[in-house]
Image: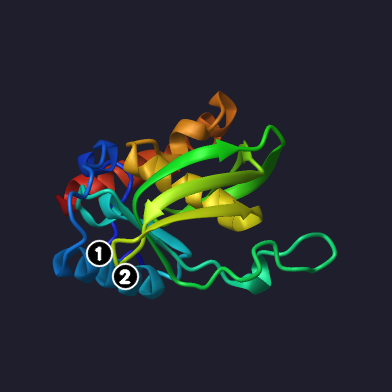
Amino acid sequence: MTGSVCIYGNPVLRKKSELVTAVTDDIRALADRMLGIMYAAEGIGLAAEQIGQTESVFVLDVPARVDQDKEGRPNNPGVKMPQVFINPEIIGASEETAVAEEGCLSFPELYVPVTRPAEVVVRYLDRDGNEQVLNAKGLLARAIQHELDHLNGVLLVDHMSVVAKLKNALQLIKLKKQSRENL
C-alpha cells in the first residue's frame, strides 16, 4: 500500500528539510512525482521526507467534499487543488483549536486525535516560484500543519499521548521493524 513512502522508523523522517534556493524543473518534477505517489497511496498530503528527500516541499490535494463546515459549505472556497508548497511557513494561526483524528502515509492504518489551530495563514512558493499567502481552515489547515511538521522532522507519534503510545506500541514496533528491513 505504501509503495515509495518511507514508513515510521526510517531516519529520513526525522530530518529537517532544507530550503529550496530556486524553483527549478527538478523541483517541479519532484512535486509531480510526490503527487503521483500520494495519489497511488490514496493520501491527501505528502512531504518530501516521506519519499526520502529533504527539500522543503509538500503537496496537498484536499477534496472540497470532505473539507466542509457543519452546514456543508466548503471551508476553503476558491482554493484550487492540487497545491504544491515550497519553503512553506506558517505566519499566523488562530487561538481557536480543533481536535480531529489524523492518519499519515508513514504510519499506515494508525489514526490518533491531534489538537491543532483551527485556522492558519501560510506563506510559500508555488510550483512556478511565485510567493503565495493562503488563509486555510478546516481539513486544509490541518493538512498544512501536518505536512509542515514532516518538514521539521515532527511525526504523528510526537502528537500521541503516553496512553496512545502504549495503546499503539505493538503497531509502532512493527512499523519500525518493517522500516529497518526496507533500508
Q: Residue at x 28, y 72 (%)?
A: 32
- At 34% from the left and 46% from the top, the residue drawn is 175
Q: How many marks?
A: 2
Where does the image place residue 29, in percent across and percent down from the top left? 20, 71
Residue at 68% over, 41% down: 99
Residue 79, position as x, y percentages in the image: 56, 68
Q: Is residue 91 left or right of residue 22?
A: right
Where residue 127 sits, quadrant-wise, is bottom left
Q: Amino acid at mark 2?
A: Ile
Could you give the CA–CA distance between mark 2 and mark 1, rounded to whole angstroms?
7 Å
Q: Nearer the viewer, residue 163 or 140?
A: 140
Quadrant where the image shows the N terminus: bottom left
SS at mark 1? loop
Q: Which residue is mark 2?
A: 37
Residue depicted at 55% across the width and 35% down the height: 167
On the image, which quarter does residue 39 sit in?
A: bottom left
Q: List x then y, in percent, for residue 63.
A: 58, 71
> On the image, numbered disc 1 is attached to which residue?
4
Nearest the viewer among 61 and 26 is 26
Quarter assignment of residue 66 = bottom right
Residue 15's disc is: none
Depth check: 94 or 101 in front? 94
Dots 2, 1 in contact, CB < 8 A: yes
Q: Amino acid at mark 1?
A: Ser
